Image: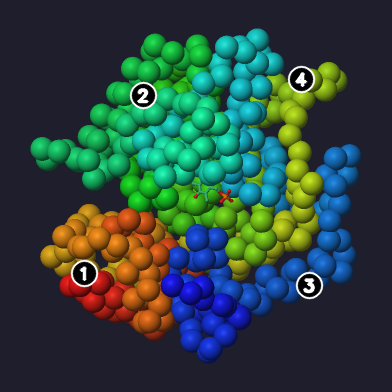
Amino acid sequence: MPLVPISHGRGAWLFDADGNRYLDGISSWWVNLFGHANPRINAALKDQLDKLEHVMLAGFTHEPVIRLSEQLSEKTGHALGHCFFASDGASAVEIALKMSFHSWSNLGLGDKREFVCLKGSYHGETIGALAVTDVALFRDAYGPLIGSAHVVMSPDARQAIDGETAQDVARRAIAEVEKLFEQRSTKIAAMIVEPLVQCATGFAMHDPLYLQLLRALCDKYQVHLIADEIAVGCGRTGTFFACEQAAIWPDFMCLSKGISGGYLPLSLVMTTDKVYQAFYHQDVKRGFLHSHSYTGNPLACRAALATLEIFEQDNVLENNVERAAKITAALAPLALHAKVKNFRQRGMIWAFDAVDVSAGFSSRFFKAALTQELLLRPIGNTVYLMPPYILNDEECALLGQRTLSVFEQVAAA
Ligand SMILES: *Cc1c(COP(=O)(O)O)cnc(C)c1O
C-alpha cells in the first residue's frame, strides 16, 4: 500500500495531499492529546521560539524545565520529587534501569543487577530496553545483542478461568512474582510494569489490585518498582497517572508520548528523594552518568507546560468521563458483535479481539478504515481506539459508527 502523504492536521483530523481526511483514532501512536495544530500549544511554542530554543542542561537550567519538574512533582504529592530528562521513551526506560542498578550499587548492593518484566511487556526498542521487552517480533532479529530478564506471568484479566475475577488473576500473577523474589531478590534491582494496561502487546488490562500487591512485595523484598507510564500516563486511563488508581507510587516513573501533547520528543524519569540521595556525592563515579544532547529541551518543555495547562483550564479528566461514556455507547453494537471477544475499556482506551476472522485482519482493517476516514491500526486481531481528548459529540458518534462499519466489512471478508 502506498504511504499516505499528510499535508496538515487540525483538531482530531489529518488531511492528505488529495484533500481526504482521517479521524486520528489512535492519537498518532498514542502521543497526541489535544488535537493537531492546537492553537494554545502552538502559541506557547511560538513564544518560546523567540526566547530560547535550546541550552545544555549541565550547569545550566531554564524556566520551562524547572516549572515542568515542579508541576509534575506536585502531581505526585512530591512522592516523586525529582525529574531526569531525556528525549524518547526507550531512553527513559534505559535511565530507570541504570538508575536502579546504580543506586543499589552506591548503597553497597551491587549484586542487585537483574530485572523482572511481564510476559508480553513492551518498554521500547533500544538494546537496553529490549532486555525488558517480551515481544518476539522486536527481539528475535537482535537476540544475540540483548540482555536477559526474568519474565513473569502477566496479570491480563482475559486469562480468568473457572469463574475467576480480574482480582483473582491479579493474585495468581502476584504469587509468581513472590516465588521469584523469595529465591532471587538479593540479585534483583527492579521490576518494570506498564500500570493497568499493557498497550503494545494488544491492550491487556489488569486490576489495580495487582499494582497494590506488587508495591507491597517490592517493599518487602527491597526491589525497585518501575512504572512505565509512557503510554498509560497523562490521563489516558482516566487519572493523570495510571498508578493513582491503585493509590501507590513507584520508585521510578517513566513518562513520554503524551507529555508534550504529541508535539516534540520529550521523556523523563521521576524518582524519589531516597534514590536521589543515593547519588548525591562529590565523587563523579557515584553520580548518575547519563546525558543526551537535547536533554530538557526548552521547546519540548514548553509544549508540555501548555499541555498541562489545558488539563487544568478545560477540566479534562472530568470531561473525559463523559466523553468516554459517549464513545462506549457508540461502540455498544461492537461489544455485542458475534465476532468480538473481550470488549474492554479503561479511561480513554477501548479494545476488543476479533475472532473467526481470516488472515491479514490487521492490515485489511487499516486499509478499510482509511477508506472510511478513520486512522485505526489494529495490533494482530486486537482493534483498539485511543483518540485525542477533544472529540465532540458528532466525532464520538462517527468514531463508533465507522469502526463498526469497517469491522463488519473486514470480518465478513
Ligand atoms: C512507546 C513506548 C515506549 C517507547 O517509547 P519511544 O519513544 O517509542 O522510544 C516504551 N514503553 C511504552 C509502554 C511505550 O508505549
| Crowding near the residue tagged with mark 3, few <14, some 14–19, many ≥20 C-alpha atoms within 10 Å | few
Mark 3: secondary structure: helix
Q: Amino acid at mark 4?
A: Arg
Question: Which mark is drawn over residue 259?
Answer: none
- Measure how far apart labels 1 and 3 are at the Cα level: 46 Å
Q: Which residue is mark 1?
A: 411
Q: Nearer the viewer, mark 1 or mark 3?
A: 1
Question: Are dots 3 and 2 in contact, CB under 8 Å?
Answer: no
Question: Which mark is drawn over residue 46?
Answer: 3
- Measure how far apart labels 3 and 2 are at the Cα level: 49 Å
- Measure how far apart labels 4 and 1 are at the Cα level: 57 Å
Mark 1: secondary structure: helix
Quarter of the image where one finds residue 44: bottom right
Q: Position of residue 392 (x, y in %)?
A: 44, 79
Left or right of 107 in this view: 54: right
Mark 2: secondary structure: helix
Q: Nearer the viewer, mark 4 or mark 1?
A: 1
| Crowding near the residue tagged with mark 1, few <14, some 14–19, many ≥20 C-alpha atoms within 10 Å | some
Question: Which mark is drawn over residue 286?
Answer: 4
Q: Amino acid at mark 2?
A: Val
In the depicted structure, whether residue 265 falls above or below residue 227: below
Q: Which residue is mark 2?
A: 177
What residue is at 79 percent from the left and 46 percent from the top? 293
In the depicted structure, whether residue 354 falls above or below residue 267: below
Q: Pick whichever, 356 or 171, lies toward us.
A: 356
In the depicted structure, whether residue 220 falls above or below residue 73: above
Q: Amino acid at mark 3?
A: Lys
Left or right of 78 in this view: 240: left
